[in-house]
Amino acid sequence: MLLRPAALAADKTLTGPEPALTSLPSQSVQVVGGTHTMQRPRELAPPEGFAEFVAARSDALLRSAWLLTGDAGRAEDLLQTVLADVWRRWATIRSAGHPEAYLRRALFTTYVSWWRRRWRSEIPSQPPDGPSRGDVAGESADRDAVRRALARLSRQQRAIVVLRYVEDLTVQRTAEVLGCSHNTVKVQAFRALRILRTDPNLELFAAWRSRSDA
C-alpha cells in the first residue's frame, strides 16, 4: 500500500511493489491498496511526514489488519478508514509523538467497533501481500492455515491474540487499546490459546510469525 498521485495510480504499470514513494504534486491523492483508494481534495497537499510514514509502515499495518479480519478486502478497508482519520488529525498526532502507536490503537478499536456493528460473517481470502517469491505453494498454505486457525476464535479473542503475540503488547497495553479490563485480556487470551492448542495449525502460525518478523 503506497501513496501515489491520482494520475499515476491509474497507470497499471505502477500497481506492483515500488522501492520508494513517488513525489506528490498538489493534485488529488490516492492511498492505494488493492482496488481500494482514498481520494483527497485537489487543493490539499499531504500533511508533512504523512506520506513517508505510510510508505514505511503500511505493509506491517496491513498485515495486522489481515490477521484481524481474515480477509484481504476488509483488511484494506479497515486500514483505509484508519488512515483517513489519521490524515485529518496528522499534525496533532505527530506533535504528540508515537504516531504508529496511535494508528495501531485506532486500527484495533475500529476493528472492534466494526464487527460489533455489522460484521456477521467472514469470507476467507488471500492475505493482502500475495504469495512470496520463494516457496509459493508452501507459503500460501501456511498463510491459509493461519487464517483458519484464527477463524476459530471470537473477534475479541483474535484481537487480543494479535496484540499480545504478534504485536508483543503487554496485558496493560492490550487492555488500553481494546478499552477493556486487564482481567478480560487475561481470560480471553487463556481461552484463545486453549482453542489454538488443539488446532494443528498452531505450529504453522508460530513459523509464519517468525518469517514475517524477520
Image (cartoon, helix red, strand yellow):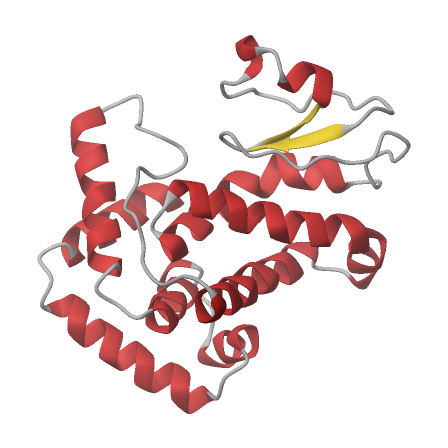
Q: Residue at the location (39% across, 54% down)?
A: 69
- Quadrant assignment for the N terminus: top right
Left or right side of 156 for 11 = right
From what the image shows, is residue 7 above or below residue 77? above
Task: Decide which of 54, 110 is in the foreground and name it.
Answer: 110
Task: Decide which of 51, 116 is in the foreground and name it.
Answer: 116
Left or right side of 158 for 33 = right
- Tell me if I can see residue 182 in this picture: yes
Q: Where residue 114 sits in the image (x, y, percent)?
A: 50, 63
Q: Where residue 63 sits in the image (x, y, percent)?
A: 43, 45
Q: Indicate the quadrant where residue 19 lies.
A: top right
- Quadrant assignment for the C terminus: top left
Q: Where residue 204 sits in the image (x, y, percent)?
A: 17, 49
Q: Residue at the location (55% across, 67% down)?
A: 109
Q: Where residue 98 sits in the image (x, y, percent)?
A: 70, 59
Q: Residue at the location (22% across, 72% down)?
A: 193
- Tell me if I can see residue 135 in this picture: no
Task: Decide which of 200, 72 is in the foreground and name it.
Answer: 72
